[in-house]
Image (tube, rainbow, N blue to C red):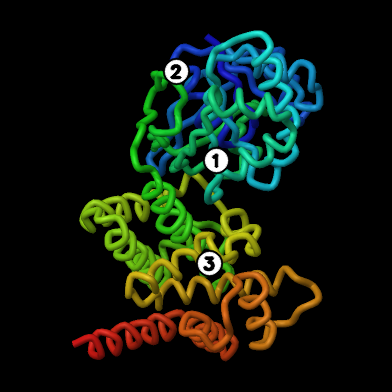
Amino acid sequence: MKAVMYGAGNIGRGFIGMLFSASGYEVIFVDVAEKVVKELQEKKQYPLRYVASQGHQDMMIKPVTAINGNDMEMTANAIAECDIMATAVGPRILKLIAPNLAEGIRRRMQTSSKNLNIIICENLMDADRVLERMVKAELTKEEIEWFDGHVGLVEASIGRMVPIQTEEMKDGDPLRVCVESYGFLPVDGAAFKGEVPDIKNMIPFEPFDFFIKRKLYVHNMGHAVCAYLGDVLELEYIYQSIDRDEIYIIVKNAMEESAAALSSEYGVPLENIMKHIMDLLYRFANTALKDTCRRVGRDPERKLSPKDRLIGAACLAMDQNVVPAYIAIGAAAGVRRYIDETVSMQQNIVCAEDVLRNVSELEIGSRLSKLILDMYQMMLEGRGLGELRRAADGIKAACSENVV
């Protein structure tokens, strides 16, 4: 059996490729990083290291090989012949791989009647629809009909945290990937075409929308808030950030706001989501991962977009009558990071309004934009995180009294 893993980066090698290998597949990675491709071709294996604050454990992933994604011929043939496939290239790269996917599907249609299921491992809302639109733009009407009947675009919720691999983590092997031990892969059980493949630790769920939003609005949102508040205190690592009491309290409360909204929206017991939050907070504190606030908070423009982790979570909370006071602190810190990274702007309330209006698509003067801007103004004034937390406490208390 053969599996194509499009993307040989942290998630490709550090998670999905490993699960494919453990399930009995020969894994064919597709990537444009020539050094990685060459090493995989020559060695036919790579080391994976589970790291924790208490120590590490090593294992070897094999058999594997690789194809350069710039070679459409070889990439398309691999897609045409494989038994299962996954992508982990990043949302902004999906459009670049769509032509290769389309050519592989075209050749599969010509040579086989086998279904092709593609597990989409991207932090992107509606990733299946986005990828479908991109691939179908490359296909003829007849090919689209075959696609609809034979290609399953399966969304996945990637919970494993894999940091940027430093030279220290590589420990003498450029292919080594250091990861945390968490290894479950929830997927959209309804999206498969034909029989669901037996892949280790893959758990099909229906309906899947809850798990996508739990990942984005609890895990990713909490991680981003931790990173942006770490920026405020000029901390380098996520574990340093979550170790600060004020940051821990704000992050935990922000995640609980999302949990309450998700519980209300989907009818899932709040206790179940709370257990997940406590597990995440423990995992954020993993010192061996050495995940940086810079990496986790990168691309603030995307993270502040209307449906992404910060604004999307806050809007869901508002829809479910949950006041996102703590999420607003994280969003304000995200705005601060965005302005810092945009050379043409300076830190001031007018620029912050522009960010919320143009990036987050919020109406200035709305309740949510006011919450965020009030927290941002406090940051401008040099108020400490303790003061911001107490301000959020006051907002929550006032809202509770109004409800009563």
Q: Position of residue 141 (x, y in %)?
A: 70, 30
Of all residues, the one furthest to the left in this rendering is 404
Give residue 22's mark.
2
User: Mark 1: which amino acid?
Assistant: Asp
Give residue 230's mark.
3
Spatial separation of the CA atoms under disc 3 and disc 2: 37 Å
User: Mark 2: which amino acid?
Assistant: Ala
Q: Give the mark nearer the N terminus: 1 vs 3.
A: 1
Q: Give the mark nearer the N terminus: 2 vs 1.
A: 2
In front of the other: 141 or 5: 141
For disc 1, the marked residue is 128
Q: Where is residue 279 in the image (x, y as percent from the top left)?
A: 32, 50
Please identify the quarter of the rendering in which residue 259 is found. Answer: bottom left
Q: Is mark 1 on a helix, strand or loop?
A: helix
Q: What element carries label 3?
A: helix
Q: Is mark 2 on a helix, strand or loop?
A: helix
Number of the front mark, 3 or 2 = 2
Q: Position of residue 255 (x, y in %)?
A: 37, 63
Q: Is 382 drawn above or below residue 237 in the view shown?
A: below
Q: Is residue 183 in view?
A: no
Q: Give the mark nearer the N terminus: 3 vs 2.
A: 2
Q: Is residue 313 in view?
A: yes
